[in-house]
Amino acid sequence: MKIPFSISRDKREEMITSIQDYFLNERQEEFGNLEAGFLLDFFMVEFAPTFYNQGVKDAHQFLSEKLEDVFEIEKTKK
C-alpha cells in the first residue's frame, strides 16, 4: 500500500493515539501502535484523497464567488 502523501512524525503519533483512544472508549478494544498505524495508513490511502478533493472544490467555489464580487465593482464606461 503506497501512502499518497506524508505527515510529520509528531502528527502521525498524535493521530495513532487518537485512533487508539477512539477504539478504547467507543468499543472497549485495545489497539497497539502497529495496528492503529495500519488503520491510519488505510484511511490515508482510501479516504484522505476524497476529503482533499472536497477541500479543493470548496476553495475553488469560495474563490470563484469572491472573484465575482470583484467584477461587480468594475466601473462601466459612460
Image: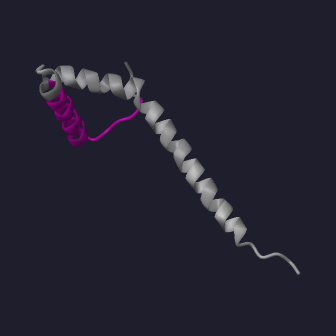
Vertical arrangement, residue 39 with respect to residue 65, above or below: above
Range of magenta residues = 4-23
Image coordinates for residue 10, horizontal then vertical, percent: 21, 42
Out of 29 and 14, give the one closest to the viewer. Answer: 29
Examine the image and state in which quarter residue 3 appears: top left
Examine the image and state in which quarter residue 29 appears: top left
Q: Quadrant of the C terminus?
A: bottom right
Image coordinates for residue 72, horizontal then vertical, percent: 71, 68
Which residue is depicted at the point 58% across and 55% down? 63
Which residue is depicted at the point 41% across and 32% down? 48
Out of 28 and 13, give the one closest to the viewer. Answer: 28
Q: Is residue 70 left or right of residue 75?
A: left
Image coordinates for residue 39, horizontal then vertical, percent: 27, 22
Magenta segment includes 8: yes
Q: Quadrant of the N terminus?
A: top left
Which residue is depicted at the point 39% across and 34% down? 5
Magenta stretch: helix, strand or loop mostly:
helix
Image coordinates for residue 17, horizontal then vertical, percent: 16, 34
Vertical arrangement, residue 77 with respect to residue 53, above or below: below
Across the whole image, how many numbered discs are drawn on residues? 0
